[in-house]
Image: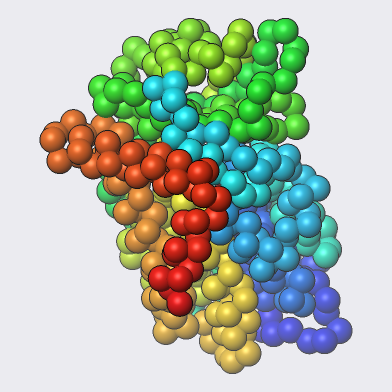
């Protein structure tokens, strides 16, 4: 049996117990769903398998902007994102109650489940999504076999493992997760509104921590459809009593930790459940195997404060789905030498390294209280603030200087 594609087969072929596809994507979070849409739109026969028909209300990335938007545009998701998310263009950045600078540029806020739904909606054939749990995968140089909890099977030439932080399937294949930093960061997510029902005076706002002992990197406030979303990123022992206080009395605790926020928020309340997440930094080992390739969090986890998770997974999706996988399918076999091309891709390696570098930088900038980092921290914020002031006095001045220097 082969799973080679013929022109007359637009989607994966299915009978009651078996689906045959070119590529089986296991895990339909953001990475897997984007990969599925990109590959299916290019005409590949794919099967996207996720245990849940709809991504649940779980706290993951909730805003994107900058280079991530450009990459989503390149992959053809920009318009769908605009329809699914809430746009904002200016972020007021403050520390100790004072304005540091203003970030200008398109960004979008959303619940993660909506982002995943957007990506899945871009698959030309909705029946490519199989709602089932994958229980086992067996891989070889030729065909891969995926077993589902329902007893069904999927056969494909390539398996893309996009199961996020769930490591069971990888583990069964002998793929291990190396923990680089246990309990590296803690993140809180909740939605706020003013008690008087009026909108906040800012479109979006980032408030940086005031004291290293608090371990607060920043609180990011940005619009989503139902209100103003808050993401609080911390580097602090997750067993510290402050975690319980943040869950039980989020308003008072946030203001105690970030007193400079008070004038910007006024009288506000948290209008939904406070979610929180403790993140380990991990990377896989023994992953170079025939027939299977790992992307997104399944390959490496990220520090939420560094905001590199989406950037990384977009590079993974772009490189794998627009370059390597289409090329691999044109010749027989799916051995290690093919798979290793993706893992050693220059852009992928750079994005993975950058993510770890940023994770360490954010932690040090937030928490290190030795003299070297104290000076660095002061300079970091001073530089931003001076650059902003100069640019406010002479709009475009800095850009022109930089342009002239580049030329
Ligand atoms: C609290 C938090 C805040 C974050 N904030 C940011 C941020 O601000 N910026 C940023 O860039 N990144 C952020 N990140 C990181 C970002 O959210 C992740 O990198 C991204 O969501 C990973 O997507 P994924 O598709 O790899 O994994 P997931 O979204 O976790 O998807 C995995 C999928 O696999 C499915 N699955 C697992 N096992 C099986 C199985 N056996 N059978 C079938 N299906 C299975 C699951 O159902 C799920 O749908 C944050 C992460 C967290 C936790």
User: Which colour assignment does the render follow?
Assistant: rainbow
* Residue 326: percent from left, percent from top: 63, 81
Which residue is at a point 63% across and 57% down the rendered structure image?
A: 69
- Compared across the picture, whether 8 is left or right of 193 comes to right
352 relative to 338, above or below = above
Which residue is at a point 20% across and 35% down the rendered structure image?
A: 374
Which residue is at a point 47% across and 83% down the rendered structure image?
A: 338
Return the residue found at the far front: 394
In-front residue for pair 377/308? 377
In-front residue for pair 314/134? 314
- Compared across the picture, whether 250 is left or right of 121 comes to left
23 relative to 134, above or below = below
Which residue is at a point 55% across and 72% down the rendered structure image?
A: 320
* Residue 167: percent from left, percent from top: 44, 49
Residue 267, by quadrant, is top right
Is any atom of residue 255 visible in this view? yes
5 relative to 273, above or below = below
Counting the numbered discs, the total is: 0
Residue 192, by quadrant, is top right
In-front residue for pair 246/51? 246
* Residue 300: percent from left, percent from top: 41, 55
Is any atom of residue 134 visible in this view? no
């Amino acid at each position: 049996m082969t799973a080679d594609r013929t022109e007359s087969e637009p989607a994966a072929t299915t009978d009651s117990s078996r689906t045959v596809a070119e590529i089986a994507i296991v895990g339909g979070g953001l990475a897997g769903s984007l990969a599925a849409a990109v590959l299916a739109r290019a005409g590949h026969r794919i099967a996207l398998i996720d245990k849940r028909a709809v991504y649940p209300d779980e706290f993951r990335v909730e805003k994107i902007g900058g280079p991530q938007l450009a990459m989503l545009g390149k992959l053809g998701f920009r318009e769908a994102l605009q329809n699914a998310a809430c746009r904002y263009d200016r972020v007021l950045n403050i520390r100790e109650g004072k304005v540091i600078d203003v970030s200008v540029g398109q960004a979008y806020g959303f619940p993660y489940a909506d982002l995943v739904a957007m990506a899945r909606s871009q698959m030309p054939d909705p029946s490519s999504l199989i709602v089932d749990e994958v229980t086992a995968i067996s891989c070889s140089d030729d065909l891969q076999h995926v077993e589902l909890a329902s007893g069904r099977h999927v056969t494909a030439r390539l398996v893309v493992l996009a199961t996020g932080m769930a490591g069971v399937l990888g583990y069964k294949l002998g793929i291990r997760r190396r923990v680089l930093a246990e309990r590296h960061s803690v993140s809180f997510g909740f939605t706020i509104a003013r008690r008087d029902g009026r909108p906040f005076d800012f479109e979006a706002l980032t408030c940086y921590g005031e004291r290293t002992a608090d371990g607060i990197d920043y609180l990011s406030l940005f619009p989503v459809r139902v209100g103003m979303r808050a993401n609080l990123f911390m580097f602090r022992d997750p067993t510290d009593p402050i975690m319980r206080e943040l869950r039980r009395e989020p308003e008072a605790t946030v203001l105690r930790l970030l007193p400079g926020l008070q004038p910007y928020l006024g009288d506000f309340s948290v209008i939904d459940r406070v979610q929180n997440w403790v993140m380990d930094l991990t990377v896989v080992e023994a992953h170079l195997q025939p027939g299977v390739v790992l992307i997104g969090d399944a390959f490496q986890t990220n520090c939420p404060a560094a905001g590199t998770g989406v950037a990384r997974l977009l590079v993974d999706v772009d490189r794998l789905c627009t370059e390597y996988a289409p090329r691999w399918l044109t010749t027989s076999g799916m051995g290690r030498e093919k798979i290793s091309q993706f893992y050693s891709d220059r852009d992928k390696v750079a994005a993975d390294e950058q993510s770890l570098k940023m994770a360490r930088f954010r932690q040090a900038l937030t928490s290190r209280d030795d003299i070297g980092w104290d000076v660095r921290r002061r300079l970091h914020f001073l530089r931003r603030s001076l650059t902003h002031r100069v640019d406010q006095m002479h709009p475009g001045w800095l850009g022109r200087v930089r342009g002239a220097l580049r030329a």
